[in-house]
Image (cartoon, rainbow, N blue to C red):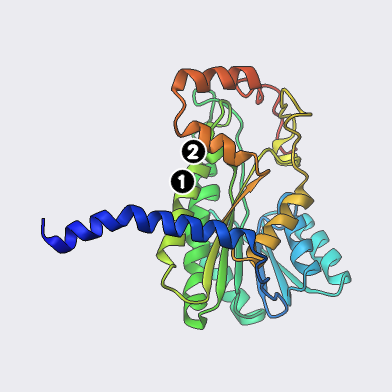
């Protein structure tokens, strides 16, 4: 090893400490908020659940245009009409993000009819809610295609133009289950773990791309019809999140250019504990918290 490499190795821990302290200091300071008045926001799965509240929140905070993608026209139309009545221009398009050709086709239609998308929110997701051996093969594939591969197709469709404009933001509504899986939702947990890896790689890949950023949101159980029937053992200690709160915090994170958002903040502790606790301890925590059986009463979206 030459002298230069040895010096770099010795300085590395000091540099790490410096950047940790710098990041901690900046997190305590009030950050400037991004102005949304010129932004065109596209939300997948925008007709209901968290997607619906995200659309309303972006409109409330001043987005110039809101675009909704989804598979159920009734929900999309109702949400679009509600947002239009509030004074924000809103459009909706039927699009299944699992279908690559359909995504690329509808992306072209959006650019021609509405304009360039500057904020892409990958929110569309499904959950099968069964164990591996009880799961239908097609249902398992559907979860992976919508929850994971759909992000590949939408991001490939809209990111190139953001890079050309040097202006844009890619948002992923993920889940804390990507880092702390539970039984009974193996399709969802797996797809969300893949989605998180996709966003981590994308976020690092865009570090040298001025004006384009990423935000990954990892919420705890959210009270939407998609997880209808899921039961938390201690609801007073771990209350389900309200979708409007998730939407508000997500838009705030986008405006602050925050890369990762855990909801609630106590989820940081969960990830930290999992990083060093032995497996037997984690298993006992799962048993005590009831996460082993929380999907036993799962009904899902009707």
Mark 2: which secondary structure?
Answer: helix
Marks 1 and 2 close (CB-CB < 8 Å) = yes
Query: Mark 1, residues whose alpha carbon is within 10 Å: few (<14), some, or many (≥20)?
Result: some
Residue at horizontal 13%, vertical 61%?
3
* Circle count: 2
- Residue 256: x, y in percent? 64, 66
Q: From this view, report whether residue 64 is shown above or below residue 147.
A: below
Taking depth in this image into account, of 233 and 185 the one nearest to the observer is 233
Residue for badge 2: 190
Quadrant into which the C terminus falls: top right
Residue at horizontal 44%, vertical 67%?
206
Please tell me the numbered disc located at residue 293.
none
- Residue 121: x, y in percent? 62, 61
Please tell me the numbered disc located at residue 194.
1
Can residue 100 be seen here? The reply is no
Query: Mark 2, residues whose alpha carbon is within 10 Å: few (<14), some, or many (≥20)?
Result: many
Picture quadrant of residue 169: bottom right
Marks 1/2: CA–CA distance: 6 Å
Q: From this view, report whether residue 4 is shown above or below residue 160.
A: above
């Amino acid at each position: 090893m030459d002298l230069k490499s040895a010096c770099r190795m010795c300085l590395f821990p000091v540099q790490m400490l410096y950047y940790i302290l710098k990041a901690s200091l900046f997190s305590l300071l009030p950050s400037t908020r991004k102005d949304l008045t010129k932004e065109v926001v596209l939300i997948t799965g925008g007709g209901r659940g968290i997607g619906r509240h995200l659309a309303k929140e972006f409109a409330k905070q001043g987005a110039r245009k809101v675009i909704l993608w989804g598979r159920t026209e009734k929900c999309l139309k109702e949400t679009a009409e509600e947002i239009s009545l509030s004074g924000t221009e809103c459009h909706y398009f039927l699009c299944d993000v699992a279908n690559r050709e359909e995504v690329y086709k509808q992306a072209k239609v959006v650019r021609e009819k509405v304009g360039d998308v500057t904020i892409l929110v990958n929110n569309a997701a499904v959950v099968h809610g069964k164990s591996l051996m009880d799961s239908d093969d097609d249902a398992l594939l559907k979860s992976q295609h919508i929850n994971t591969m759909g992000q590949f197709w939408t991001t490939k469709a809209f990111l190139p133009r953001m890079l050309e404009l040097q202006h844009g933001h890619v948002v992923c509504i993920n889940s804390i289950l990507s880092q702390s899986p539970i039984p009974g939702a193996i399709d969802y947990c797996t797809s969300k773990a893949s989605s998180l890896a996709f966003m981590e790689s994308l976020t690092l890949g865009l570090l040298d791309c001025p004006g384009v950023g990423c935000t990954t949101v990892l919420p705890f159980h959210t009270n939407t019809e998609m997880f209808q029937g899921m039961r938390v053992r201690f609801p007073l200690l771990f209350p389900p999140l309200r979708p409007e709160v998730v939407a508000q915090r997500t838009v705030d994170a986008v405006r602050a250019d925050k890369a990762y958002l855990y909801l609630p903040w106590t989820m940081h502790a969960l990830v930290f504990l999992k990083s060093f606790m032995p497996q037997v301890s984690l298993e006992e925590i799962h048993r005590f918290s009831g996460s082993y059986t929380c999907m036993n009463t799962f009904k899902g979206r009707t």
